[in-house]
Image (tube, rainbow, N blue to C red):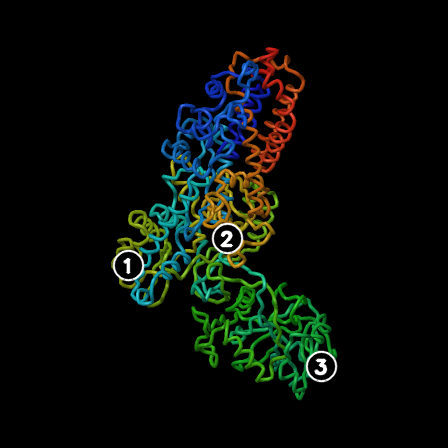
Amino acid sequence: MDAAALFKFAAASPVLTSGEAKLVLGASLASSQRKRLAHSKASSFCSLLPSRLYCTELCEIFHSGSKRRARGPVMAAKKTPEGSTQGEGKYKHTIDLPKTTFGLRANSVVREPEIQKLWEDHQVFKRVVDRNTGETFILHDGPPYANGNLHMGHALNKILKDIINRYKLLQNYKVQFIPGWDCHGLPIELKVLQSMDQAARNELTALTLRKYAAKFAKVTVNLQMKSFKRYGVWADWNNPYLTLYPEYEAAQIEVFGKMVTEKYIYRGRKPVHWSPSSRTALAEAELEYPEGHVSKSIYSIFKMVRASAGSYGLFEDYFPSLFMAIWTTTPWTIPANAAVAVNPALLYCVAEVHLAKSSGAKQINTGSVLRNGEKKLFIIMALDLINILESKWGVKLTIRKSFLGSALENCRYIHPVDGNECPVVIGGDYITTESGTGLVHTAPGHGLEDYMTGIKYGLPILSPVDDSGNFTEEAGRFSGLNVLGNGNIAVVKYLDDNLLLLAEEPYKHKYPYDWRTKKPTIFRATEQWFASVDGFRRAALDAINGVNWIPPQAENRITAMTVSRSDWCISRQRTWGVPIPVFYHVHTNEPLINHETISHVRDIISNKGSDAWWNMSTKELLPEKYHNVASEYQKGTDTMDVWFDSGSSWAAVLQKRVGLSLPADLYVEGTDQHRGWFQSSLLTSIATTGKAPYASVITHGFVLDEKGLKMSKSLGNVVEPETIISGGQSSKDGPGYGADVLRLWVSSVDYTGDVLIGPQIIRQMSDIYRKLRGTVRFLLSNLHDWKPEDSISYVDLPKIDQNALFQLENVARMTKAGYENYQFYKIFQVLQRFAIVDLSNFYFDVAKDRLYVGYAFFHFPLIGLTSN
């Protein structure tokens, strides 16, 4: 690589928009090859630099006739205290002092918006893409949610994408980057509702709510787009994709229809994550598991009344005082109990209970049955848990008999609430001795494992809980009580009053919360629409193996999540979303859904948008062949999971937009998207096309504060991108550093893990930025009168200059490797060391004598601009 080529490569480095780090390489080459400074600096630089504008400062450097030139101080001879210029006199002509309009201070808060406006006015991104002649590179943008201001995670994500895209542009790729936004769902609906008073809410219709929600989403998109532009991000901002656009919604309906045709979509009554606070079903990706949740767990006993034919001899001596001990963290599910499950391979025992003086472990409240001590008790439990339970309950347990769990199958016990007989059944591997008693209270309407066991044994799927999380009349005495509040307490009290409660203790564990309302969820059996992941799980796992995952361990994470994923609940009981295009018979409630009905609805939505589902009649929404029976059907009211919305972006964007194709070259999102967008996109694409929607996937970590803590308004440690760029409203927020310092920070961190940011880190970045800028300024100031004819060959250079060029070539090689491997922090480290240590601290210091006086006295050219 010759010197001019190295300079072009270095100057075009896309880590920083303002070009300071880029010019470190370029200008250092110029300085290290020649010192005969000429007056035509701009023209000689322009012959080496690419003709495209990539940085904030190019205008400042090269357009000497513009008003911008006056902003930067000119480096010239220093002045004496009296005001006379040093160097005036007979020796002035012997000194060649540096001169430049490139200021030491960037004035980024003012200059960056001006340059960014220039980019937009001249459509720089489009012109560069059109000029490139290489292959197409598609980085498909994951849509941020349009419900508020951007945070530091957004900045990290979009700037990483921009660095990648700029490098690909410099490699002659036709880069396609279409920004997107996720615009449907509950958070936006809640924002609208919160802005209204109660009277307005009472009169709110579905169409009015949708109108307000669409308006809110579009306003938020414009605000977020403005922020992304301020970060210096290049994209096709004039043609974004929004999930509320009719053409997008139609493509989503088309994906749904193909999955229906492949028989991957079904309707069923099964337990799903239900949010009482949102009154809707939730998918796995809509849950979070905050630290510190504590449940009220209980040990309860159910009275066994009959042994199976094969095990009567085991238990006959212990009737009528024989009980089974169960443990649960959700006492409110006991009214829905349908069985007790055991592990057939575990050892169980009958243990006689003897009261002890100890009151049990701390924080445990023993029940009346143990406090009174009047009742003779024989309890069945796992043999391995005897010692632990003795300690917890504060009793002495004497083992009377032991046996395998298989001996308990088909024994019968009395339901603790309704008094009916229920069976003991064989469960699965989820029954262990790690906690509890080894016997599992089974409520098929309130848990997936319980549901699967219930299907196997034909158990009733009871779920006496309504949309708000309150017991229904089916729960009898508990009707109207909230299951997460007084209903839970009432069940525990009832068990204690009936001498069925052994002990109660707080239990700290991970529990699912609604990620939007930040409130606990429940498992509840309801009629929902599901995507059968089992139907294409194997194909999805095979596709994962064919994707390039960065970092490599990301493959293990998404593989584990795909292996364990249950069927995907895709229906939501909300208004603001894409409708599930299904019609129900008014008498039988049987669904009408087929290729013909779905295609008809898709065509309508493509032309009129999804509002058509609410403002058109059932007859108008049905194909003509069904018009004579339209009165027998009614439209469904469910909308699709927003992850189905965003997970269809490959179909709505990559397959529909001109110049794009499937799969995308790259997806870049946070590590939480392994169970979110990465997975929903994979599942919908595999189900309908048989291949993954992406060739490579990069995942980055979360942004934490300087101490490694999650940012929180309550902790006061939130760092806002806008504050870093433009400064805060108060002095404690610090000055505005500009987007380049924020981008420099992004380039400096190893994004494959969680990254830290805070005032101290930003100040350090600003110092490094200033040192890089100072290095560039020194180089430019000594090139103010350079001319190409002053060049000399590499072999004629002094050893120190040859060494500088050798180092530069190594920097260029390592920089290119860093870009190719998406390891931008290595580029940052290499450039920082080269500019500040190798150049400023050593090479410049040694070369200063030759730079200032060498030519005038010795007519000795320092270094040339070409190599052999």
The mark that comes first in sequence, 1 or 3, is 3
Would you say residue 663 is visible in this rendering? Answer: no
Name the spot of residue 840 as percent of width and height, x first.
61, 28
- Drawn side of residue 192 relative to residue 718, left or right: left
Query: Which of the 4 image quadrants contains residue 529?
Result: bottom left
Q: Amino acid at mark 2?
A: Gly
- Drawn side of residue 788 relative to residue 579, left or right: right
Image: 826 above or below 857: below
Q: Which secondary structure, mark 3?
A: strand
Foreground mark, 1 or 2, reads 1
Mark 1 and mark 3: span between their CA atoms? Answer: 66 Å
Residue tagged by mark 1? 618
Residue tagged by mark 3? 352
Q: Amino acid at mark 1?
A: Thr
The mark that comes first in sequence, 1 or 2, is 2
Residue tagged by mark 2? 535
Q: Amino acid at mark 3?
A: Glu
- Drawn side of residue 212 relative to residue 861, left or right: left
Name the spot of residue 492 as percent of width and height, x first.
56, 78
* 10 Å crowding of disc 3: few (<14), some (14-19), many (20+): many
